[in-house]
Image (cartoon, rainbow, N blue to C red):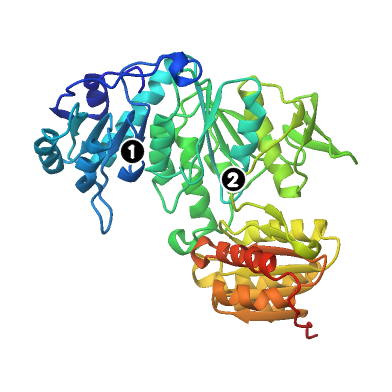
Amino acid sequence: MRTWDVERVAAAAGASIVGPRASLPSRPTGAEAGGELDAGAGPGASRAVIDSRVVGAEDLFVGLRGQSVDGGEHAVEALHAGAWGVLVTPEHAAAALAAAKQVPSAGAILAHEDPLAGLQALAGAWRRELGTSGAKVVGITGSTGKTSTKDILAALLGSERRTVSSPENYNTEIGLPLALLAAPPDTEVLVLEMAMRGAGQIAELTAIAEPDVGVIVNVGPVHLELLGSLEAIAAAKAELIAGLAAGTTIVVPVEDPLLAPHLRADLKTITFGERADVVLEQVLSDGRVLIRAHGREFELQPSFGQAHNLRNLLAAVAASLALGVDPHGPLHVRFSALRGERLDLPDGVVLINDCYNANPMSMRAAIDDLSETAPARRVAVLGDMLELGPEAPRLHREIGLYAADRGVDVLLSVGSLAAEMRVEFEGESYAVAGAQEAAERLAPLLREGDTVLVKGSRGVGLERVAELLAERRDESPEEPRERPVS
């Protein structure tokens, strides 16, 4: 949007201009800004925001209606904060226009009956503008691992292309448009994550993003409570396939029977996994990996080695090749927060903070990581996996059995569903109701050299366990510990 004036922004959003800008905010010169201006710097907004508390001078504030709050009520605050402009409902636009008389050089006031629809239309228009300059868009979805795959792909492309990826959580009907609108005019590749809670949502995101390359990392039992079956989940993910333009590329797991009915002959399909188009051929002792794709071999040295992330790497390599970028050499990936983060605590304890979310697939992957990397005792703090429907108790019991099979020494379940894990777990185990109690129960259980995995659905709030554990052990590292009960 940085190159667009008020009229073009309004037209793209399908909004009317209620209050013209009194003046445009001056932009700093390269010297004043401490560096060169972004390509195409001009009179437009630099991004869209929906939180009036973070509004800056080059921001378009979009006032969205929520369940309990109407963001449009904060339009005047945004103008006082120096916003480039506001996009709100007509009634809030009228109030903002009246208040703008008290604001020197007030920004543009744009009215739309449905500000979210305006935001999405504006994002779609900006995506097409980026496309005229040759920018490519990758859309990534999947039941688990889509964020990590996004992070890996952005790192793969970053040294070869001007790459922008969606920030954490910007993967919904609100977040994806915000991520798109933040992309500067000189973007060459935009990597977008697409999340869904039900049917039709991936289709909506695909229509906005118009991906040149689509990636489906996997299909698994996530949102079963809402969608009812794995087939329905696959169909929802496959909305990405249905929404791609003819001649574009889709990246999928090899021989996935759930996705097979949705593949299209007019798309270029690249598979990854065993006996696929993109294959992990060898993991060397020094951490380097050899990947074979379409008869060619690529050597990479990733900063990670977990099996699930190496599989995510294959999906990212497939997408990179589809964009004409050959992966090679060192690959340092900074994964998004709460996704396998490792923290060294006193007494040689290692905390694996993987509590952003959880489902049966990601829970198994995290347990595998704990099993394969822990040098001493393996301690698992596992919370409820939500939205699994009637099968939830059985799926939780299966996780307990899997944890036992993978050598977990101590299991601390958090929540009523997670308590089912203890049914099939024969080792040392404890059950608590919530995150606060989990932190209090866990701290005295730990021994020197333990590795602790903390994982559960976000609604359980297990990030609090990691925070309290770090705080308390920093404050009193010599506190006596409870001896385990066999």
Which SS class for mark 1?
loop
Q: Residues within 10 Å of mark 2 (few under 14, many from 20)?
A: some
| Circle nearer the viewer, 2 or 1 | 1
Quarter of the picture containing the C terminus is bottom right
Image height of 244 relative to 385, above or below: above
Position of 317 relative to 414 (above/below)? above
Secondary structure of the residue carrying numbered label 2: loop
C-alpha separation, residue under disc 2 versus residue under disc 1: 24 Å
* Label 2 sits on residue: 336
Q: Position of residue 360 (x, y in %)?
A: 62, 62
The residue sitting at 78% across, 79% down in the picture is: 427
Along the line of sight, which residue is nearer the eye, 345 or 299? 345
- Left or right: residue 426 versus residue 468 is right
Numbered circles on residues, count: 2
Mark sitting on residue 55: 1
* Residue 437 in picture, x, y percent from top left: 58, 77
Question: On residue 400, which mark appears?
Answer: none
Task: List the single residue furthest toward the bottom.
Answer: 485
Residue in view at x 61 percent, y 38 percent = 151
| Percent of width and height locating residue 138 | 53, 30
Residue 368 falls in image quadrant: bottom right
Residue type at numbered disc 1:
Val
Work out whether 41 lies above or below 207: above
For marks 2 and 1 on the same chain, the one whose residue lies earlier in the sequence: 1
| In the displayed structure image, the side of residue 36 where residue 484 appears, left or right | right
Q: To which quarter of the image does residue 48 belong?
A: top left
Compare residues 308 and 106 and report the one nearer the observer.
106
Q: Amino acid at mark 2?
A: Ser
